[in-house]
Image (cartoon, helix red, strand yellow):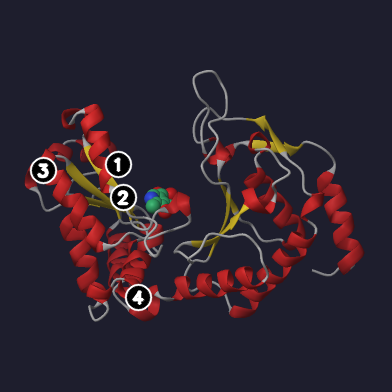
Amino acid sequence: NPFKGSLDPAKLRDCIARHGAEKIPFVRMEASTNLIGGQPFSIANMREIRGICDEFGIMLVLDASLIGENAYFIKMREDEFKDSSCADILKTMCGLADLVYFSARKVSSSRGGGICTNDHSIAKKMEHLVPLFEGFLTYGGISVREIEAMAVGLYETTDLTVISQSPSFIEYFIGQMVDMGIPCVTPAGGLGAHIDAGRFLPHIPQEDYPAGALAAAFFIASGVRGMERGTLSSVRDENGNDILADVELLRLAFPRRVFTLSQVKYVADRMKWLYDNRDLIGGLEFVEEPPVLRFFMGKLRAKSDWPEKLAAKYRQDFGESL
Ligand SMILES: *Cc1c(COP(=O)(O)O)cnc(C)c1O
């Protein structure tokens, strides 16, 4: 499926019928969808969702933090837009939303972020909050220098050679994983390559955070810092039980303009070694668990001495070399 980030229109209609449109303040689409492996949606899908939102008078919000990558995939995978410029694709996507917000770190390689709308009634509703939380309306709490840098970054996002960079590295890496039989999310998405920890470590129960364990094990075997995207990134229910994630993924992010191909090859090589030694990897448990967004600041420990055993096997195979 080239567009795994697309929303299911039938499920959206069901959801509206179940809860009532008046209880739904907005529908949010994420370009590209982070937690399922940076997967894009199509403009055809966004148009359909826009239609449903119009029918029920619900606002459509676009998370544009990774919009460059989603636009790139639309150009590559959606026939109608194969000859369109990136700028036209970006404008089409933003034009379909009532409100667009983004992390400047990702979309424009600058600090801060933004909330954009050309709907005055929506802007009016938010206006009085800006001086309260950010700064006066004319600068919104960001320095002018940063806004200038953001503008440069946004222009760069219209350049195919810039926005194709990270997806091309990811596609290469995912190709290597597929060739070596290492479970991962396909097709290659934006943001990062996503290793399927559920299938990589079937012997670790979800309660022991297999994706977190894989991240720790991979750091031991390579010095590469990946990010858990699974049950650790989820929350607990009202009884204190983990809400098990639908997918347990290790994200290896490939930001643009950061890596060389030889570094990518090194990562693939160490992942192969780890896959061959996956039986040595065990689970994790929390030592310190923050009540919100626990994956950012929480501390965990191994449930046995598996990290030591993994490191010992590493030394046996590679000596002290990295
Ligand atoms: C990273 C990300 C964010 C948050 O970005 P910050 O820079 O941490 O504010 C929001 N949405 C998506 C889709 C992201 O990938």
Q: Are marks 1 and 4 in contact (CB under 8 Å)?
A: no
Residue 173, how many percent across, how many down? 58, 71
Q: Viewed as shown, does residue 255 lie left or right of 269?
A: left
N-terminal of the pair, mark 2 or mark 4, is 2
Quarter of the image for residue 316 reads bottom right
Q: Which quadrant would the C terminus be assigned to in this image?
A: bottom right
Asked if residue 133 is positioned above or below residue 139 in the image, the reply reads above
Q: Which residue is mark 3?
A: 55
Cα–Cα gap, marks 1 and 2:
8 Å
Secondary structure of the residue carrying numbered label 3: helix
Q: Is residue 279 above or below residue 170?
A: above
The residue under label 1 is 11
Q: Is mark 3 within 8 Å of ligand 1?
A: no
Question: Tag 2: residue type?
Answer: Leu
Residue 114 in percent (x, y) is at 28, 52
Residue type at mark 4 is Met
Marks 1 and 3, Cα distance to the nearest angstrom?
15 Å
